[in-house]
Amino acid sequence: MAEDKIQEKIPTVVADDVHIVYRVNGAAGGKGSATAALSRIVRRGKGESRGVRKVHAVRGVTFTAYRGEAIGLIGTNGSGKSTLLRAIAGLLPTEHGKVYTDGQPSLLGVNAALMSDLTGERNIVLGGLAMGMSREEIRSRYHEIVEFSGINEKGDFITLPMRTYSSGMAARLRFSIAAAKNHDVLMIDEALATGDRKFRIRSEERIRELRKEAGTVFLVSHNNKSIRDTCDRVLWLEKGELLMDGPTEEVLKAYERETSK
Ligand SMILES: Nc1ncnc2c1ncn2[C@@H]1O[C@H](COP(=O)(O)OP(=O)(O)OP(=O)(O)O)[C@@H](O)[C@H]1O
């Protein structure tokens, strides 16, 4: 019995000692001041190029995610959560270490590449094609996507350009497009926080369905309730390092203890 359980665990994402460094051009700041000049000299002495500042956003993160898991990413502002997701999605190169994935991870909102001047209708087609769906598949899921998004609940908004949508409406459409496909690895960055309560409940249900369809879901959120309702495992990042990796309740309790100080 125990052996069966072990065999069922199929890895979908393996992060092995991942380091991510941003390089910011022209960030030397305070050009004329003596301290700025001194720090430039010191940096150059260390072999760093002029005007380029490095931000070491993720520092040696290692974990393995398995099929069927919903993993929450928590941590205070700037702790490296979004950066880690972007690296898993293959949108950022690693400075050191590697990310191995089974299938193409989809980062909600970025992979969907929506355009604000196009109507919601056109964006559904565009987003679907960008995710690798066929036109036929998009056509057959179209009504489901519109209905799930609830965009048309307050009028015929789906035929208006997306720039006329509120940020919550745009987030709902992005989520609905992304959720129409069964993903190997679906990553959601704060999407649940933008919708209203009714939409949040609906999207949490859809996340549970996606998990049943054998994918892995990553969710970045500052809303601990969303994490509790959807995730069974949590990674806690702080200053780019993985502080804790474990069952949701255990990690959230430690996090809440730390952040309420
Ligand atoms: N494009 C960028 N260029 C340079 N530095 C960046 C860039 N994006 C993020 N950073 C830096 O990397 C670090 C991690 O940022 P990241 O957005 O991953 O944190 P986060 O945990 O998702 O934060 P939040 O909870 O505020 O969304 C921060 O110090 C941030 O300033």
Image (cartoon, rainbow, N blue to C red):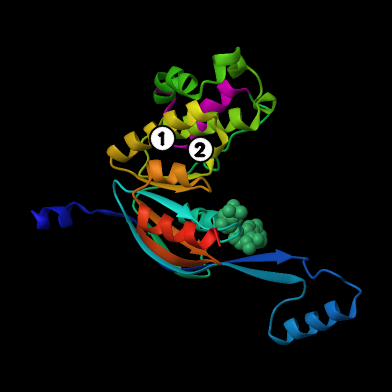
Is residue 159 depicted above or below 179 in this figure? above
Say whether disc 2 or disc 1 marks the residue closer to the N-terminus.
Answer: 2
Quarter of the image with the C terminus in it:
bottom right
- Give neighbour class at mark 2: few <14, some 14-19, many 20+ (Cα, 10 Å): many
Q: CA distance from mark 2 to mark 1?
A: 8 Å
Instruction: Report the predominant secondary structure element of the magenta stretch.
Output: helix
Quadrant in which ligand 1 is drawn = bottom right
Which residue corresponds to mark 1?
204
144 magenta-colored: no
| Mark 1 close to ligand 1, CB under 8 Å | no
- Give neighbour class at mark 1: few <14, some 14-19, many 20+ (Cα, 10 Å): some
Residue type at the position of mark 1: Glu
Q: CB of mark 2 within 8 Å of CB of mark 1? A: yes
Residue at x 71%, y 70% (from the top left corner): 53
Q: Magenta residues?
A: 119-136
Q: Residue 113: in sight, yes or no?
A: yes
In the image, 103 versus 177, the foreground residue is: 177
Q: Is residue 248 left or right of residue 171?
A: left
Is residue 152 depicted above or below 52 in this figure? above
Residue at x 45%, y 66% (from the top left corner): 242
Q: Is residue 248 left or right of residue 24?
A: left
Q: Is residue 220 left or right of residue 247?
A: right
Residue at x 74%, y 65% (from the top left corner): 25
Quadrant in the picture for residue 226: top left
